[in-house]
Amino acid sequence: MLSAGNDTEHLRILAGEHEPFNQFYLHALMDKVLSELNLSYVDADRTIKDYANYLIGLVLSKKLDAFEATTLLKDLYIEMDFESYLHGFYLLFFAKYDLMHWGDQHYWDGATKENIDQVMLDYFVEWRSNNS
C-alpha cells in the first residue's frame, strides 16, 4: 500500500512491524489502518473487492501501473485459494507476462502485444462496475 502511494501514520507503523508479533496490538493497528484507508474487513469478500477496487482506482488515475496491480491481484487470487471473482486478474497477469517475455500468450482471447494494456484497462473498468 505504501509503494502504491498511500502514506498514513498507522500504515507506516504497520509496515515497520516485525516478529515477534503482538496480535492484540496488530489487530488494533489494523483497525486504524483500515479506517484511514476507508476499508472494512467485516465481510472478507467485500474487503477483497474493496481492495481490488482501490487498486483499480489507482490504475485508472495513473498512480499505479496496471501490470503491478494485476500482479498484486494475481497473488491475492492464489492466497485466497483461487477465489473465482479474482480469476480474470490471474489470467491477465499471465497473458501480459507471456507477451512481454515470449510475444505470444494463450490466457486471454484476442490479447496481443499491441493491445494488452488496453485489454487490461477495459477489464478493470468492467470488473469495477460489476463489483462496486
Image (cartoon, rainbow, N blue to C red):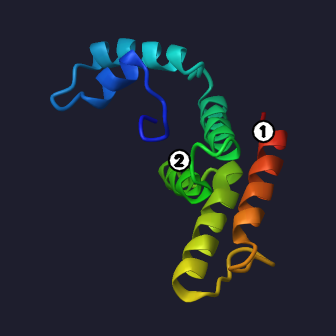
For the residue carrying disc 1, how many other residues have a C-alpha within 10 Å: few (<14), some (14-19), or many (20+)? few
Q: Closest to the observer: 30 or 122?
A: 122
Say which element carries label 1. Answer: loop
The C terminus lies in quadrant: top right
Q: At label 1, which amino acid type do we have?
A: Asn
Say which element carries label 2. Answer: loop
Q: Closest to the observer: 106 or 5?
A: 5
Marks 1, 2: nearer the viewer: 1
Q: Which residue position holds label 1?
A: 131
Which residue sits at x=67%, y=43%? 56
Q: Closest to the observer: 129 or 63?
A: 63
Q: State which quadrant residue 39 falls in.
A: top right
Q: Which residue position holds label 2?
A: 80
Q: At label 2, which amino acid type do we have?
A: Met
Q: Is residue 73 above or below residue 25?
A: below
For the residue carrying disc 2, how many other residues have a C-alpha within 10 Å: few (<14), some (14-19), or many (20+)? few
Q: Is residue 21 left or right of residue 1?
A: left
Q: Is residue 31 left or right of residue 26?
A: right
Q: Which label belongs to residue 19?
A: none
Q: Closest to the observer: 7 or 32?
A: 7
Most extreme residue toward the left is 20
Distance (Cα) linking label 1 and label 2: 17 Å
Q: State which quadrant residue 70 falls in.
A: bottom right
> Which x, y percent locates residue 98?
57, 80
Which residue sits at x=51%, y=20%? 34
Which residue sits at x=84%, y=41%? 129
> Which x, y percent locates residue 8?
43, 20
How many dots with numbers?
2
Q: State which quadrant residue 89 falls in.
A: bottom right
Q: Is residue 88 left or right of residue 44?
A: right
